Amino acid sequence: MNLSDEEKTILLKAARDSIAGYFDNRKSEEPDYTQFPQLKLNAGAFVTLTINKKLRGCIGYIQSDDTLYKTVVDAARQAAFGDPRFVPVDPKELSKISIEISVLSPPFKMNSYDEIELGKHGLIVEEMGRRGLLLPQVPTEHGMNKDEYLSALCQKAGLPSTYWKKRTLKIKMFTATIFSDKE
């Protein structure tokens, strides 16, 4: 998705405001969609929160029936207060949190592992009633090669890490527009 710098700024501010608003029952004010029509489109999005480059929460939606703006607002709040891997964000942490937003393309079928481009494609696996997702930036941020990326995807879905070597798994790929408040 082609977002302007201004639209990215609006989404980053909305994410931060939705987290801060949790503490004082404030709601984010929606933007003027006639001026920023991209924010009205339906798109999946993930919000990743870090403190000192350490993960503090990450929640998102592969696809959404809501506007991109509302999807980001909800994902930010869920990342801060609903990620089961972490205790809820404390008000004292607000000023330390860095926010990264990944706006997802619609998922498309992978036919071969050869199609995967590290740093470009996020992956979604659905096997044996389990599902796992890794964002496109994961392998580059963690110095993974393709084998390690596929093993991490299997682990994320609760499958054995070498499960992908037994056969070509049912994987969907996606791309993402990624931006953060550190830019």
Image: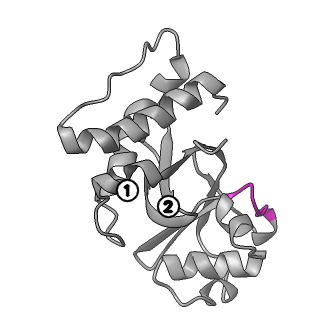
- Which residue is pictured at 56% across the width and 80% down the height? 154
Q: Which mark is residue 93?
A: 1
Mark found first going from the N terminus, 1 or 2: 2
Magenta stretch in the rendered image: 115-121
Q: Residues within 10 Å of mark 2 (few under 14, many from 20)?
A: some
Q: Which mark is residue 51?
A: 2
- Which residue is pictured at 52% across the width and 10% down the height? 35
Q: In terms of secondary structure, where does tag 2 sit?
A: strand
Q: Is residue 65 visible?
A: no
Indicate the position of residue 98 as horizontal and vertical percent values.
52, 51
Indicate the position of residue 135 as horizontal and vertical percent values.
60, 59
- Which residue is pictured at 66% across the width and 89% down the height? 166
Q: Is residue 73 left or right of residue 138?
A: left
Disc 1/disc 2 C-alpha distance (Å): 8 Å
Q: Is residue 139 visible?
A: yes
Q: Is residue 105 left or right of residue 15?
A: right
In the rendered image, residue 128 lying in the magenta stretch gets the answer no
Labels 1 & 2 near each other (Cβ < 8 A): yes
**For this rendering, which residue is in front, 125 or 43?**
43
- Which residue is pictured at 39% across the width and 47% down the height? 76
